[in-house]
Image (cartoon, helix red, strand yellow):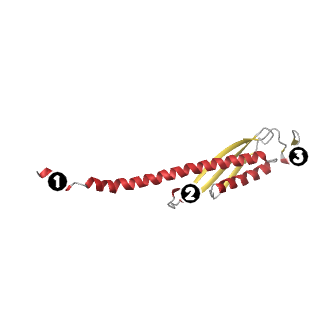
């Protein structure tokens, strides 16, 4: 009989324990899932911006113009995705800048984590992405200071 009284006194305690432990844990897990999802979207946005910058750089006629075009394209692409980088660094590797050559653009972005969770948590996150583009073999390209120009047909 005494055993039954103890069990009756404990009735409902599991529900209270679940409410105290499981619900906050579930909330933390949900916030973490949102953070990871938004982090993946930011990574995709950085890759898209690097690809747009590489494409814009490959369309330029000089290495200097390629750098300027890559920077502009990266800024426009990230602004279109509502991403603010402080600072946004755009590095253009034009060592193979020639018709049929390859140009590489690396974007490095540091942004606040406040927008990633929706809770305004402090901190910053740094990410980078690299993309390559081939310079068209039929495009007139100036190598800048050497003054040499490669042509294939009218431009």
Q: Residue at x 86, y 45 (%)?
A: 146
Element class at badge 2 = strand
Q: Position of residue 99 (x, y in %)?
A: 81, 39
Q: Residue at x 29, y 56 (%)?
A: 16
Q: Position of residue 141 (x, y in %)?
A: 83, 44
Mark 3 crowdedness (10 Å alpha carbons): few <14, some 14-19, many ≥20: few
Q: Is residue 134 above or below residue 23?
A: above
Image quarter in which the C terminus is found: top right
Question: In 3D space, how far apart are the residues under numbered discs 2 and 1 (Cα atoms)?
Answer: 53 Å
Question: In 3D space, how far apart are the residues under numbered discs 3 and 1 (Cα atoms)?
Answer: 95 Å
Element class at badge 3 = loop
Tell us which disc is closer to us: 2 or 1: 1
Q: Residue at x 33, y 56 (%)?
A: 19
From the viewer's perspective, is 23 left or right of 152?
Answer: left
Q: Earlier in the sequence, mark 3 or mark 1?
A: 1
Q: Earlier in the sequence, mark 2 or mark 1?
A: 1
From the viewer's perspective, is 149 left or right of 14?
Answer: right
The residue tagged 2 is 124
Q: Which mark is residue 153?
A: none
Q: Is residue 99 above or below residue 16?
A: above
Q: Earlier in the sequence, mark 3 or mark 2?
A: 2
Q: Position of residue 130 (x, y in %)?
A: 66, 45
Label 3–label 1 contact, CB within 8 A: no
* Residue extending farthest left: 1
Q: Which mark is residue 147?
A: 3
Tell us which disc is closer to us: 3 or 1: 1
Mark 1 crowdedness (10 Å alpha carbons): few <14, some 14-19, many ≥20: few
Q: Residue at x 17, y 53 (%)?
A: 6
Element class at badge 1 = helix
Image quadrant of residue 83?
Answer: bottom right
The residue tagged 1 is 6
């Amino acid at each position: 009989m005494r055993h039954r009284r103890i069990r009756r006194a404990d009735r409902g305690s599991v529900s209270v324990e679940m409410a105290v432990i499981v619900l906050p844990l579930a909330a933390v897990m949900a916030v973490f899932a949102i953070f990871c999802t938004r982090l993946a979207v930011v990574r995709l946005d950085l890759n898209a911006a690097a690809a747009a910058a590489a494409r814009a750089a490959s369309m330029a006629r000089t290495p200097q113009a390629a750098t300027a075009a890559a920077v502009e394209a990266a800024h426009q692409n990230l602004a279109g995705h509502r991403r603010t980088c402080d600072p946004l660094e755009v590095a253009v590797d034009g060592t193979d800048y020639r018709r049929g050559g390859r140009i590489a653009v690396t974007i490095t972005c540091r942004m606040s984590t406040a927008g990633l969770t929706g809770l305004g948590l402090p901190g910053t996150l740094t990410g980078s992405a690299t993309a390559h583009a081939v310079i068209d073999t039929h495009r007139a390209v100036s190598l800048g200071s050497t003054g040499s120009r490669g042509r294939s047909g009218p431009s």
